[in-house]
């Protein structure tokens, strides 16, 4: 027993240098979780108001996630960033991620505008992969925003990445993420087929949007 206690004491001593960074990381992750809650509440409020005014929800689903430590480290190494807590906060924009799935393409831009015009939101970057799709056909609107969270010690701005896309774009991206994204053994034929699927899906999205417009015009 004495032996065990001695060993645990030694272990505690050995792990001391890791305790401080580990606690800091845990706290930082909690802050990112709080930032997600803030942005998600804003989106829920907008969706409810939209339902009240237009009798439909522009937002089909909201998915949230905190990036896993393994994925954070992989990204920092891939992009050549220093592996430190400050570098993580500074360089990794998508530790807190929110994916907003909309019904129609024009809903994406409505939701983005309604969110970013709020005066406590700072927009850091906008990447429009719908107007400028990636070579593989990936389409989505990416916003990196900063939002204040109110802690007992004061206000802290946290970064959140908001990805907004249609149901169809989300279907493609989810499957492509599983089949191909980040995989090194890419096969030219499957890449080509995935791109063709993305383009077909986009055409369908455009058709769905014009069908909805025609229906609205007929009703008026
Ligand atoms: P994961 O596993 O989804 O978390 P930046 O953040 O601006 O410094 P980054 O991260 O290259 O640079 O930005 P970008 O292009 O906006 O991409 C961020 C995220 O978008 C990715 O995060 C993916 O979630 C998604 N994404 C981007 N391109 C693709 C794609 O071709 N296919 C799929 N399925 N998703 C994509 P991660 O961290 O790379 O991956």
Image (cartoon, rainbow, N blue to C red):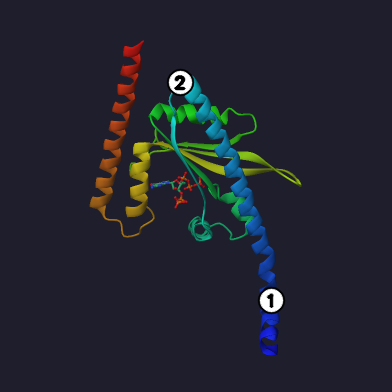
Residue assigned mark 2: 54
The residue lying at 69 percent from left, 64 percent from top is 20
Which residue is nearer to you in this view: 141 or 82?
Answer: 141
The residue lying at 69 percent from left, 70 percent from top is 17
Tell me the quadrant of the picture where the C terminus can be found.
top left
Residue found at the very far right of the displayed protein:
153
Q: Is residue 210 above or below residue 19?
A: above
Percent from the top left, x then y, of residue 156? 69, 44
Residue 12: mark in rendering: 1
Say whether mark 1 is within 8 Å of ligand 1. no
Q: Is residue 180 above or below residue 144?
A: below
Q: Is residue 38 above or below residue 28?
A: above
Tell me the quadrant of the picture where the N terminus can be found.
bottom right
Q: Is residue 55 left or right of residue 215?
A: right
Percent from the top left, x then y, of residue 177? 37, 51
Q: Is residue 97 left or right of residue 105?
A: right
How far is mark 2 from mark 1, CA to CA?
Answer: 60 Å
Which residue is nearer to you in this view: 54 or 65?
Answer: 54
The residue lying at 69 percent from left, 76 percent from top is 12
Q: Quadrant of residue 154?
A: top right
Percent from the top left, x then y, of residue 62? 47, 40
2 and 1 marks in contact (CB < 8 Å): no
Q: Is residue 14 left or right of residue 181?
A: right
Which residue is nearer to you in this view: 94 or 187?
Answer: 94
Say whether mark 2 is within 8 Å of ligand 1. no
Local secondary structure at mark 2: helix
Residue 197: mark in rendering: none
Percent from the top left, x then y, of residue 186? 30, 56
């Amino acid at each position: 027993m004495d032996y065990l206690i001695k060993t645990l004491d030694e272990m505690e001593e050995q792990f001391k240098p890791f305790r401080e960074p580990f606690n800091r990381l845990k706290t930082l992750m909690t802050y990112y979780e709080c930032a997600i809650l803030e942005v998600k509440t804003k989106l829920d409020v907008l969706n409810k108001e939209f339902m009240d005014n237009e009798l439909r929800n522009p937002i089909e689903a909201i998915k949230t996630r905190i990036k896993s430590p393994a994925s954070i480290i992989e990204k920092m190494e891939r992009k050549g960033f220093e592996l430190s807590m400050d570098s993580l906060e500074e360089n990794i924009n998508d530790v807190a991620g929110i994916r907003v799935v909309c019904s129609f393409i024009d809903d994406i831009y409505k939701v983005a505008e309604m969110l970013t015009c709020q005066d406590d939101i700072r927009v850091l970057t906008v990447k429009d992969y719908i107007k400028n799709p990636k070579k593989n056909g990936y389409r989505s609107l990416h916003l990196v925003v900063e939002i204040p969270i109110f802690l007992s010690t004061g206000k802290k701005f946290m970064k959140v990445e908001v990805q907004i896309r249609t149901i169809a774009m989300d279907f493609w991206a989810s499957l492509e993420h599983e089949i191909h994204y980040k995989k090194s053994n890419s096969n030219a034929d499957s890449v080509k087929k995935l791109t063709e699927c993305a383009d077909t899906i986009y055409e369908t999205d455009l058709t769905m949007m014009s069908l909805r417009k025609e229906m609205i015009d007929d009703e008026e």
